[in-house]
Image (spheres, rainbow, N blue to C red):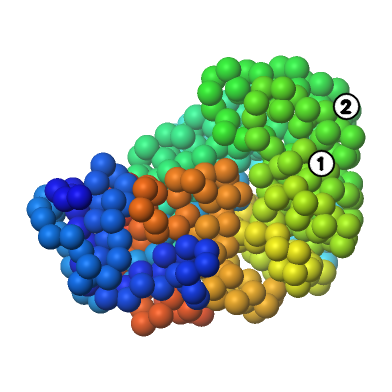
């Protein structure tokens, strides 16, 4: 099997492989990398003898799959700290949105920002994510809502990945809010998304998937069904912001289109959970938005677990409902707010997050053949990754077997 490009010795592994015990732990282990992929892993004593171009000792530290943030709105102009204060004074998120603030205020700031300004602001957030062990991030558009700005946001998202050694997957979220340009006519705007914007984004090769916001203050299930039909006709995967503020049949809609994921899910009904289970759709839970909006309706975690729906966790990093760039903080919040176990939390930002992006064959676990995206931690046990908030035990990350240049 050797020669390898890299061997990491003296490591403890949380492989997160299903069916291999809690966290898929292998202690006193080594990993060998060839051409960016894991070529061998196991107990150090079983490492096949032979040559490696480079050898590193992990000095007894832990390696996990590089973390995956499967739901972010990383690229936007300005911030909404003023609205955040208004909300603390009792004005609701919906009331702010209905009076022209909310998503629309970020749309105005984003359209007015230059590419360099957007890159610099999102770059800061991306570096914070990287310091949390994230090696893959999904980034949605949705703060442009005209063709030119949506294309710009998706290009900037891809460029950020190149600049930071980060795997970036882009999602076209055209159906995020109805812009003033359409004078509040959501159906007209959906025509524009399906007939013009989505085909252009797809032709430019800028979207890995299509998302939409299903809510009373956004789009109806009928309108989103049209968006999803258009996406499917172009061969694009779909995902959905579903049942966040009210029960709107979002989970059922996502399942009907075999969506990769249905996200938020605070108000999802038992029928919605059953539909997700049947469709194999991942539930992406977003405790950052839950705490920021001071929600009290907890997503149906027990039922999702019981029905075997894979649960991912993500930051939902955005200026309105989740000004949070720390996936580690999200893991800790998921334990206290949603009673998820530390192992479920780590699966939620590795294996299940990969599935929420349709990349489970390439990333999300430590297994031979998968891309060697790793995070190395100075901890005694992987349960600690959901325990501390604000203590950073990350030693370094590896993307496709290369130590990240930012650390
Ligand atoms: O995931 N729900 C819609 N999108 C974001 C919020 C966007 C915003 O308020 O700017 C979310 O919570
Ligand atoms: Fe979101």
Residue at 88% x, 60% y: name it: 269
In the depicted view, which residue is nearer to us: 200 or 146? 200
What is the x, y in percent for residue 258? Answer: 73, 41
How far separated are the C-alphas under marks 2 and 1?
A: 21 Å
What is the x, y in percent for residue 217? Answer: 86, 45
Labels 2 and 1: the sequence-earlier one = 2
Q: Secondary structure at mark 2?
A: helix
In the depicted view, which residue is nearer to us: 301 or 47? 47
Residue 407 shown left or right of residue 77 in the figure: left
Which residue is identified by label 2?
187
Q: Is residue 217 above or below residue 181?
A: below
Q: Is residue 138 above or below residue 265?
A: above
What is the x, y in percent for residue 388? Answer: 48, 79
The quarter of the displayed image where residue 292 is located:
bottom right
Which residue is identified by label 1?
256
Residue at 60% x, 40% y: name it: 140
Residue at 69% x, 73% y: name it: 338
Mark number displayed over residue 98: none
Q: Secondary structure at mark 1?
A: helix
């Amino acid at each position: 099997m050797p020669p390898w490009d890299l061997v990491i010795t003296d490591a403890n592994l949380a492989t997160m492989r299903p069916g291999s015990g809690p966290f898929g732990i292998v202690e006193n282990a080594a990993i060998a990398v060839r051409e960016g992929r894991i070529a061998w892993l196991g107990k150090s004593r079983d490492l096949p003898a032979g040559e490696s171009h480079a050898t590193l000792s992990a000095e007894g530290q832990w390696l996990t799959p590089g973390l995956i943030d499967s739901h972010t709105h990383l690229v936007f102009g300005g911030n909404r700290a003023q609205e955040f204060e208004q909300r603390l004074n009792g004005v609701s998120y919906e009331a702010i949105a209905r009076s022209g603030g909310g998503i629309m205020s970020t749309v105005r700031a984003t359209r007015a920002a230059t590419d360099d300004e957007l890159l610099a602001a999102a770059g800061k957030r991306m570096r914070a994510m990287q310091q949390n062990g994230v090696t893959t991030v999904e980034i949605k558009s949705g703060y442009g809502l005209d063709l030119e700005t949506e294309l710009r946001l998706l290009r900037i998202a891809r460029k950020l990945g190149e600049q930071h050694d980060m795997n970036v997957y882009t999602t076209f979220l055209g159906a995020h809010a109805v812009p003033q340009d359409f004078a509040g006519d959501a159906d007209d705007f959906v025509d524009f998304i399906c007939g013009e914007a989505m085909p252009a984004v797809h032709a430019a090769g800028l979207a890995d998937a299509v998302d939409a916001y299903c809510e009373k203050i956004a789009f109806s299930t009928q309108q989103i069904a049209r968006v999803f039909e258009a996406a499917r006709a172009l061969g694009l995967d779909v995902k959905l912001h579903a049942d966040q503020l009210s029960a709107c049949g979002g989970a059922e809609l996502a399942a009907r289109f075999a969506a990769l994921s249905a996200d938020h899910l605070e108000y999802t009904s038992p029928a919605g959970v059953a539909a997700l289970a049947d469709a194999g759709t991942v539930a992406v839970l977003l405790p950052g938005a839950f705490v920021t909006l001071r929600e009290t309706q907890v997503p149906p975690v027990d039922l999702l677990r019981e029905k075997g729906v894979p649960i991912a966790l993500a930051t939902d990093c955005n200026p309105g409902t989740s000004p949070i760039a720390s996936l580690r903080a999200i893991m800790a919040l998921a334990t206290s707010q949603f009673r998820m176990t530390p192992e479920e939390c780590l699966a939620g930002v590795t294996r299940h997050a990969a599935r929420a992006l349709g990349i489970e064959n390439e990333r999300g676990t430590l297994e031979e053949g998968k891309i060697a995206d790793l995070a190395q931690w100075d901890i005694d046990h992987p349960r600690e990754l959901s325990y501390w908030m604000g203590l950073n035990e990350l030693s370094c990350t590896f993307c496709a077997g290369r130590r990240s240049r930012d650390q």
